[in-house]
């Protein structure tokens, strides 16, 4: 079976490596892939958002199944276009991907169907939004309606910060038309949990929970990033919390999407806050998270390809989806200066990896036959172990065996999770 994977980051590398474990996987194409993914797939220089070129590729190459991984092509309708060209896909249609593509749609969906989330208001113009900022409770959260590279959420402690957030999104349009509408919502507190789930539109199977670390610097300081590391499972996500989320959030969301005529097939990401009033949805993503995928998939037992095929074919209930009773930790090695300015082009020295170690390349290129840095987040060093303390230790040991100039990483990935395991908050 020839498989096409759309995307070019660490998430896609993790997906490709897991797909390769199935003996049915023959040629795997990555569009566009990256210099590290090239060791595991045939990379083709077609951008993930260039849907006409992607469709032309599948018309001229033998592709039996496609996995559309990033948010942009999903929201733009890549699955619709590929399936119209005769290629079955893992991933939601354009209509279903609106659950991430429009925060207004997602919030209104939750309000209509009684799914717990933060209270909110929607604004279509800067003037009314600015007026609301003069009286809204603080802190408050201002969100661009559309996709914004994961950076369209602004937490505002003061009225001036709130006013500036509105101006930046709606007047300065720092994220383009994504900020044409904004959601202003209640600031929630509590432990955050990420839960990815396979769903074929009827059945939903949550994966092992995880905890992301978004801030650039130790102690959750510095600017937001695409994610500096992850651990799984998340100790705050107890069996009792999981049961409550299934009944109050996961199943109602799948049923709501079906009732709206937008059945969701693929991976649905639930970003949750465990508040004093119970779990609430912070955000939905219409795809695998990054770097959550880099700790969840190494714990998956069995064939990812079979699960993805069953999801696409509407027979997920027939598949036994299991995860190892172990822990995983991923430490992101980034280019110094990320998420701001940084230099690239530095040679990367990678170590040999053991059975419980994985290196997922996110931002790298091949230059004169050598792997060199090519992005802000360069790679993720992931380790699997019997428990979380051992996984964290092993992931850092692996990260410390990787070398490139200008490298940096957070040194406290998993620390909060370890405190939770010890009974602290």
Image: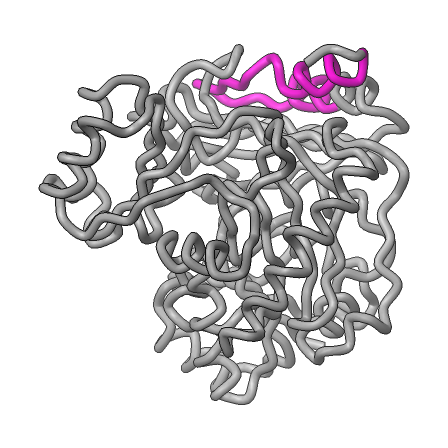
Q: Is residue 342 visible?
A: no
- Residue sitting at x 76%, y 58%: 205
Which quadrant of the rendered structure holds the C terminus?
Answer: top right
**Residue at the image point whose x is 50% and y is 16% from the top:** 220
Residue 71: quadrant of the picture: bottom left
Name which residue lies at 23% across and 22% down.
Answer: 161
Q: Nearer the viewer, residue 322 or 145?
A: 145
Q: How is the image coloured?
A: one colour
Viewport quadrant of the N terminus: bottom right
| Residue 52 visible in image | yes
Residue nearest the observer in this picture, 280 or 75: 280
Drawn side of residue 385 relative to residue 122, left or right:
right
Q: Is residue 413 above or below residue 379?
A: above
In-front residue for pair 26/277: 277
Give the percent coordinates (x, y) of residue 100. 44, 56
Magenta residue span? 395-422
Q: x, y (%) of residue 42?
A: 57, 63
Q: Nearer the viewer, residue 129 or 152?
A: 129
In the rendered image, the vertical position of residue 139 relative to residue 299, given as above or below:
above
Q: Position of residue 371 (x, y in %)?
A: 52, 38
Q: Residue at x 68, y 65 (%)?
A: 199
Q: Examine the rendered structure and indicate whether residue 98 appears above or below residue 58.
A: above
| The magenta stretch spans residue 87 | no
Answer whether residue 403 is magenta in the image: yes
Is the residue 67 above or below the residue 107 in the image? below
Number of numbered markers? 0
Direction from residue 207 to residue 173 in the image, left or right: left
Q: Position of residue 116 (x, y in %)?
A: 56, 46
């Amino acid at each position: 079976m020839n498989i096409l994977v759309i995307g070019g980051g660490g998430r896609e590398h993790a997906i490709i490596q897991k797909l390769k474990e199935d003996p049915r996987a023959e040629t795997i194409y990555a569009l566009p892939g990256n210099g590290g993914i090239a060791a595991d797939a045939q990379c083709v220089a077609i951008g993930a958002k260039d849907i006409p070129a992607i469709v032309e590729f599948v018309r001229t190459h033998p592709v039996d199944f496609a996995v559309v991984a990033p948010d942009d092509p999903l929201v733009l309708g890549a699955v619709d276009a590929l399936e119209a060209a005769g290629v079955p896909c893992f991933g939601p249609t354009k209509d279903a991907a609106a659950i991430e593509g429009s925060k207004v749609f997602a919030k209104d969906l939750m309000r209509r169907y009684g799914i717990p989330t933060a209270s909110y208001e929607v604004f279509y113009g800067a003037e009314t939004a600015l007026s609301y900022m003069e009286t809204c409770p603080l802190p408050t959260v201002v969100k661009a309606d559309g996709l914004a590279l994961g950076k369209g959420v602004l937490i505002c402690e003061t009225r001036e910060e709130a006013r500036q957030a509105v101006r930046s999104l709606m007047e300065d349009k720092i994220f383009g038309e994504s900020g044409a509408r904004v959601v202003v919502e209640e600031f929630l507190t509590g432990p955050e949990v990420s839960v990815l789930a396979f769903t074929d539109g009827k059945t939903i199977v949550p994966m092992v929970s995880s905890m992301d670390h978004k801030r650039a610097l130790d102690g959750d300081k510095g600017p937001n990033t695409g994610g500096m590391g992850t651990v799984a499972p998340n100790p705050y996500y107890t069996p009792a919390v999981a049961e409550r989320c299934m009944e109050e959030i996961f199943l109602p969301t799948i049923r709501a999407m079906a009732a709206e005529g937008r059945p969701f097939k693929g991976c649905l990401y639930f970003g949750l806050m465990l508040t004093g009033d119970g779990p609430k949805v912070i955000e939905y993503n219409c795809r695998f998270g990054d770097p959550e995928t880099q700790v969840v998939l190494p714990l998956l037992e069995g064939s990812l390809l079979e699960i993805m095929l069953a999801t696409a074919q509407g027979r997920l209930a027939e598949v036994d989806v299991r995860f190892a009773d172990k822990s995983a930790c991923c430490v992101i090695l980034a280019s110094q200066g990320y998420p701001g300015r940084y230099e690239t082009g530095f040679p990367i020295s990678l170590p040999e990896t053991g059975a419980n170690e994985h290196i997922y390349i996110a931002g790298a290129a091949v230059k004169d036959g050598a792997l060199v840095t090519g992005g802000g987040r360069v790679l993720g060093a992931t380790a699997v172990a019997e428990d979380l303390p051992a996984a964290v230790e092993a992931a850092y040991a692996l990260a410390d065996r990787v070398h490139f100039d200008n490298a940096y990483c957070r040194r406290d990935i998993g620390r909060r999770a370890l405190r939770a395991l010890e009974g602290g908050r």
